[in-house]
Image: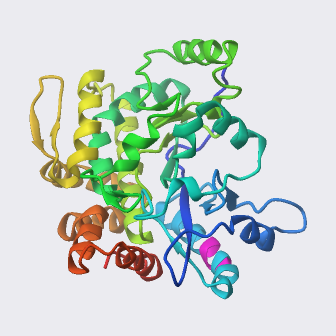
């Protein structure tokens, strides 16, 4: 099987942000996605930047192909303004986090579309539990031969991105004890999770051919890895991050992703060896960051050296400063330090719950407020 990789500008960037639709009064999810999509749909067809998702409580906003993360963020903000013109009169708020703190998965309605119906029919109980929200960052790669080496190198920084973005401590009204419950929920789907560290593009083609031949998938998009090539766009797509509660943190995490990809691309140009970790360390790092978040001790290298993830992030930010300057995202990358100072969303959510006697309505209200404010509160 031949999988062509589209031409794209080096280190171009695109963002996708899944948003929950919540009732202004109760804080519970509202099944009004179709109402929103119908209202914003242009006469010529589907809206280019406001998309349908698996559940009727969700819409997704997507940026265009941009030069900087700031430009991509402005795209998202325009779409959000358009959505709010519809949702405000309905007394519906927008919210994003890896999970809704107390909503029940069994009460959610699936979008009536063939691909979603097929997914639920195949995956059953686990598929119906996918009451989760994420952020996807696409970064353009100009040469297909770079894609898999950069993908492998990015896995070394998987726990950094997951810890910083962790925003799903609650599930169905209970504290799970995890910083990112979403990370471990999502990997229950077939073809989701960490994926394989292929050395050659032909190995990826063989993998996809096998899956299609045996009926596991019908198209490449159904390979739902946390970090995957996106051949149709000519990008590497990072799907690591939990749903981000506000635009400031979203752009900070996008800038970190953007800079890492460009950094590794430059290393390849210079003939330098990229960092890699054996799959068992990558797997352990994913679990540690999902469980402990900002308190995770992560494995740094093949020798098994370890460091507190926040210390490792601090070192990484200094290393990436020149890359951020080249990419025009120095301010956004610096906002990662805001997360280091104020804590990740899962920590802020737990603090709100403690201050309010464990009431998760207050947590939803805080998430809605952060979305409105555009920054962590």
Front residue of 315/187: it is 187
**Residue at image point 77% right, 47% down:** 113
Q: Which residues are magenta?
A: 78-82
Q: Is residue 81 magenta?
A: yes
Q: Quadrant of residue 121?
A: top right
Q: Is residue 334 left or right of residue 3?
A: left
Q: Quadrant of residue 45?
A: bottom right
The picture places residue 148, in percent across and down from the top left corner, at 45, 26
Q: Is residue 199 placed above or below 369 in the rendered structure?
A: above
Q: Main secondary structure of the magenta part?
A: helix
User: Is residue 235 among the parts visible in the rendering?
Assistant: no
Q: Residue furthest bottom?
A: 89
User: Is residue 307 among the parts visible in the rendering?
Assistant: yes
Q: Is residue 283 left or right of residue 305?
A: right
Q: Is residue 83 placed above or below 168 in the rendered structure?
A: below
The picture places residue 264, in percent across and down from the top left corner, at 35, 36
The picture places residue 196, in percent across and down from the top left corner, at 43, 22
Front residue of 83/147: it is 83
Q: Is residue 308 left or right of residue 228?
A: left
Q: Is residue 246 magenta?
A: no
Q: Is residue 63 placed above or below 159 in the rendered structure?
A: below
State which quarter of the image contains the N terminus.
Answer: top right
Q: What is the image's colouring?
A: rainbow
């Amino acid at each position: 099987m031949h999988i062509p990789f589209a031409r794209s500008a080096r280190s171009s960037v695109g963002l996708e942000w899944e948003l929950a639709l919540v009732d202004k009064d109760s804080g519970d999810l509202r099944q009004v996605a179709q109402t929103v999509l119908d209202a914003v749909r242009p006469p010529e067809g589907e809206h280019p930047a406001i998309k349908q998702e698996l559940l009727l409580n969700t819409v997704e906003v997507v940026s265009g192909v941009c030069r900087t993360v700031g430009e991509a963020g402005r795209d998202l903000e325009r779409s959000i303004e358009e959505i709010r013109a519809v949702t405000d009169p309905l007394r519906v708020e927008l919210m994003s986090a890896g999970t809704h703190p107390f909503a029940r998965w069994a009460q959610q309605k699936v979008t009536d579309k063939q691909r979603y119906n097929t997914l639920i029919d195949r995956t059953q109980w686990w598929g119906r539990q996918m009451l989760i929200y994420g952020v996807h960052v696409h970064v353009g790669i100009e040469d297909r031969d770079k894609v898999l080496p950069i993908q492998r190198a990015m896995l070394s920084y998987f726990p950094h991105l997951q810890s910083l973005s962790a925003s799903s401590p609650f599930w169905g009204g209970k504290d799970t004890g995890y910083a990112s419950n979403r990370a471990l929920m999502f990997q229950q789907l077939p073809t989701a999770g960490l994926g394989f560290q292929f050395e050659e593009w032909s190995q990826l083609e063989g993998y996809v051919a096998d899956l299609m031949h045996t009926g596991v998938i019908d198209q490449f998009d159904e390979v739902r890895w946390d970090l995957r090539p996106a051949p149709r766009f000519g990008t590497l797509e990072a799907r690591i991050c939990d749903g981000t509660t506000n635009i400031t943190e979203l752009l900070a995490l996008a800038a970190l992703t953007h800079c890492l990809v460009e950094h590794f691309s430059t290393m390849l140009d210079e003939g330098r060896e990229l960092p890699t970790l054996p799959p068992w360390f990558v797997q352990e790092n994913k679990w540690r960051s999902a469980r402990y978040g900002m308190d995770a001790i992560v494995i740094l290298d093949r020798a098994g050296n370890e460091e507190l993830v926040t210390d490792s992030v601090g070192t990484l930010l200094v290393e990436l400063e020149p890359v951020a300057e080249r990419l025009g995202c120095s301010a956004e990358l610096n906002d990662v330090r805001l997360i280091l100072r104020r804590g990740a969303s899962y920590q802020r959510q737990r603090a709100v719950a403690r201050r309010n006697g464990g009431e998760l309505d207050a947590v939803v209200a805080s998430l809605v407020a952060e979305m409105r404010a555009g920054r962590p509160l």
